[in-house]
Amino acid sequence: MSIWTWIKHWAERQERKAWMNRYYCDQRCPKCDTWQANCGGWRHVELDGPAPFHDVCTCGKCGQKTTLFDFGMGYIEVDPITLERLA
């Protein structure tokens, strides 16, 4: 591992640690596999999207929408049409 790769990973860890200290949780975009702490968070969250307890979140990096089931402390990705749980 080069020194520049090590510095990049160290900076990402510091950024993630600061995010966790501020928000106490983090989520990963299922489309681009990016932690929201690494891209500034969800760009837009539409509460109660297709049904109550379902939120439509727009990723801050890739801009794609994801429908998530809000069960309190976390989210489960669901299909936006059928509202069935995705793998």
Image (cartoon, rainbow, N blue to C red):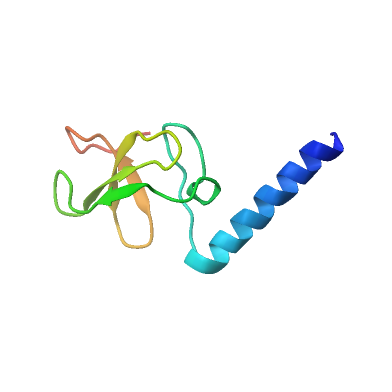
At horizontal 39% and vertical 48% (from top left) the residue drawn is 42
Q: Name the residue furthest left.
A: 51
Compared to 14, does 4 lie above or below? above
- Dividing the picture into quadrants, the one containing residue 63 is top left
Point out residue 83 in the picture as x, y percentages from the top left corner: 20, 38
State which quarter of the image contains the C terminus: top left
At horizontal 42% and vertical 36% (from top left) the residue drawn is 30
Compared to 9, does 2 lie above or below? above
**Which one is nearer the viewer's eye here, 15 or 26?**
15
State which quarter of the image contains the N terminus: top right
At horizontal 44% and vertical 51% (from top left) the residue drawn is 41
Number of numbered callouts drawn: 0
At horizontal 31% and vertical 48% (from top left) the residue drawn is 44
- Dividing the picture into quadrants, the one containing residue 60 is top left
In-image side of 74 versus 50 (left or right): right
Point out residue 53 in the picture as x, y percentages from the top left corner: 20, 54
